Amino acid sequence: MPSRFWDDSLASRYRNFQYHFNANALSGRVVVIAGGTGGLGAAAVALLASEGARLVVGYRSNRARAESLARAIEQQFQQKLVLVAGDLSDPSVRRQYLDLASTLGPLCGAAIFPGDPARVPIESLDRDSLLASLDANFIGPFLLARDLGASLAASAQGGSLVLLSTMQAHAVFPHSAAYAAPKAALAHAARILARQWPAVRVNVVAPGATIAGMAEASVQSGKYDSFVADSSIPRFGRPEDVARAVRFFLEPDNYITGQTLVVDGGLTLRRS
């Protein structure tokens, strides 16, 4: 018995080497970029704006930086950003993301960048510092993913969520417990959400030693120099590397869900 889901016209095109690669698939689509004014998020905003996406961009408190990014995006790509301010743990802030996105059209997807490096030595960790990191690196991002994902799941077209983790959640780095553990929990929670919503793709991007974003200070200090010197990585990561990975997962009709893409140049594989 032939498959009920077989598409003979599609198969015929493939037999004749006729393929469809949708250029600028996000043009005119509504995408939320939470934490989109930071070092890595801003690159994703620029990439999506260059494609013509309609963007709701969130930041925690630095309005001057957010407005500077909005001006730069309008000058470079003739795209206006809709800005949202506030902490993701606040339900009213999460509601703003949904409400403002709805004014632009149906939500297509979201990337959730916010976090905090939580650079606290293990010997100095206490309950308060652990809870602060958990709130910034897991609770807030997860709750926004839940809210946006539920909205996408209820829509006819579904959509895509991208959560930002870190290479430290996927390999052992000294003194990283406060930061890595909540990010590892976020990556696992993303898989749970991916299973819960068949129409919503949920994936994770885990940046490595990148010259913008949370790793900037560590890279600038020389902390990771040895990895370039011994050829563990060919260079430090760039915000464009992360932006392209996020864009890949946001592609409409993408066939991937529940996965983590570690964008670290091979550092977690090759470091001594």
Image (cartoon, helix red, strand yellow):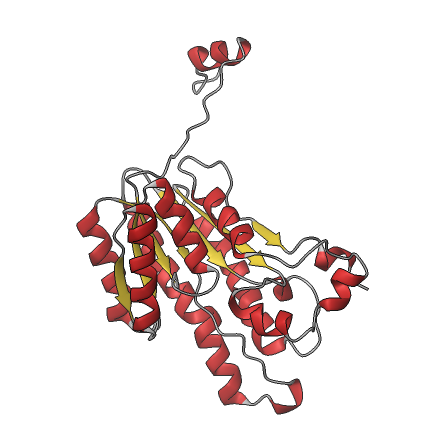
Is 255 on the left or on the right of 233, as rendered? left
Quadrant position of the C terminus in the picture: bottom right
Residue 172 drawn at (x, y percent):
71, 68
Give the camera-side residue of 107 and 51.
51
Q: Write down the quadrant of residue 199 in the picture.
A: top left
117 w.r.t. 228: above or below: below
Is 55 on the left or on the right of 193, as rendered? left
Residue located 63% across and 76% down the image: 177
Residue 71 drawn at (x, y percent):
29, 59
Give the camera-side residue of 208 and 106.
208
Direction left: furthest residue: 103
Q: Write down the quadrant of residue 180 in the picture.
A: bottom right
Residue 65 drawn at (x, y percent):
35, 69
Give the camera-side residue of 268 and 125.
268
Residue located 27% across and 68% down the image: 93
Give the camera-side residue of 225 and 138.
225
Residue located 43% across and 20% down the image: 5
Is 164 on the left or on the right of 224, as rendered? left
Residue 260: tell me if it is visible. yes
Residue 91 drawn at (x, y percent):
27, 70
Residue 2: tell me if it is visible. no
Is 20 on the left or on the right of 94, as rendered? right
